[in-house]
Image (spheres, grey):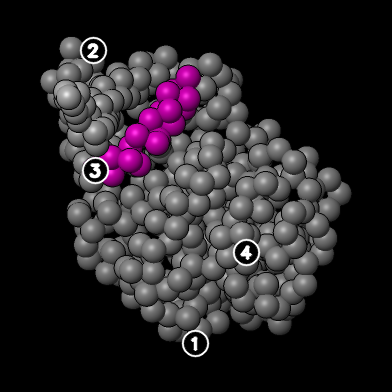
Amino acid sequence: MKTICLYFEVHQPLKLRKYRFFNMGRDVNYLDDHLNRAVVVKNAMRCYKPMNQLISRLIEKYDGKFKVSFSMTGSMIELLKHYVPDVLESFKVLAASENVEFFAETYSDSLVSLIDDGAFRRDVERQSRLIEKEFGVKPRTFRNTELIYSDHIGEVVADMGYTAMVTEGARHILGWRSPGYLYTNAENPGLNLLLRNSGLSDDIRYRFSDRSWSEWPLTAKKYIDHIEEDEHAGDIVNIFLDYETFGAYQPCESGIFDFVKYLPEEALKRPGIQFGTPQTVIKEYQPKAVLHVPYPISWTDEERDTTAWLGNELQEEAVSKLYALRDKVETLNDPGLNHVWDFLQSANHFYYMNTKWFTSMVGKESPYDSPYDAFINYMNVLSDFSRDVNNRYAKLMQKQSPKATAPAFA
């Protein structure tokens, strides 16, 4: 029996407005609210609404045999609640089904797992509490930003109580082994690892509407044929995609919704194929081996490492100066500052500063003319935010310090 695990990332990075030097000290409106609203509404109409409706129908039609999973950031839940609350309600309907699993992850799609273990734990716990509050389910599977994973990160995740984690089936880590099996963390064997099948995932994510591709058009039948004939042995086929793949990156006219519509029919009529979620998979299969990942991996670029976000001096300076404020922001615990702190941590800001020579990934095209422009704009915002944080922190310390008492005279 081969199990297909479909899991989707639901996140929208908030775009910063053009913030110049002369705005500093006078304007704390850092976000392009008009653009951010337009993007989430557009994605709701093109992707979230039609896909949620389609998934609900498929779960009902196939009597619970069709299963999917979602990984949704806390900041995305906030966006949906603010701009398209009916979409959030449709996700709640899905969450009520035993055939849909919701993951834990970082609150704002941040790189905090690479920075500080304590802050990482607090960030994940915050997102997990929000998932439980909004959807009534407690996450037991973890997905990190950009599928970033290492032995140490996995150990921290296991210590937080999660029993499964999804990451990339990076070839330089797997070697001759297949991503189609369960593996375990090298430091804590209680954490099961599910590895993304990059080839089959990218067939949908990038190549689906490419008419020059030898497999175009990709039908549900052809896709399931590939899964049956997949050269990689294994029990599990982990297909991990941005949710916006459906209707946004791959438009409706490409036939992407019909592809999803007929996918369970084609799969379930084959005697050796079923659908599952990470939690059903770890109950059914035994881990094949321990996976050793001494250095962080991700699902981005050919290298499958973290240099897309931390690969040059611009990115390192921005990340360093941002997280230097962490203790002060946590001490102040001001709702307004916390909101800014959340969106400034989003990994996409640092991705836009990327100077590597490669073609931009689908859905991550930079709104800036150059990595340097992205750095300048971000640092202008960060400098103003830093000024605000430092001023408030100084006032707080002044209030908390004991007043000097006058000397007593005999």
- For label 1, the residue is 63
Amino acid type at image mark 3 = Asp
Position of 286 compared to 311: left or right? right
Q: Nearer the viewer, mark 1 or mark 4?
A: 4
Give the residue displayed 83% in from the left and 53% down from the top: 177
Name which of mark 3 and mark 1 comes first in the sequence: 1
Give the residue displayed 30% in from the left and 20% down from the top: 383
Mark 4 near mark 3, Cβ–Cβ under 8 Å?
Answer: no
Q: Badge 3, how many Cα within 10 Å: few under 14, some, many 20+? A: few
Near-viewer residue (72 or 253) = 72
> Any magenta on residue 149?
no
Calculate the distance from the C-alpha at mark 3 to the C-alpha at mark 1.
Answer: 47 Å
- For label 2, the residue is 21
The boundaries of the magenta stretch are 317-334
Mark 2 near mark 3, Cβ–Cβ under 8 Å?
Answer: no
Is residue 356 among what the camera can see?
yes
Q: What numbered label is drawn on residue 164?
A: 4
**Most frequent secondary structure within the magenta stretch:** helix
The N terminus lies in which quarter of the figure?
A: bottom right
Name which of mark 2 and mark 1 comes first in the sequence: 2
Q: Which residue ends up furthest to the left in the rendered image?
A: 26
Give the residue displayed 18% in from the left and 38% down from the top: 34
Is residue 57 among what the camera can see?
no
- For label 3, the residue is 334
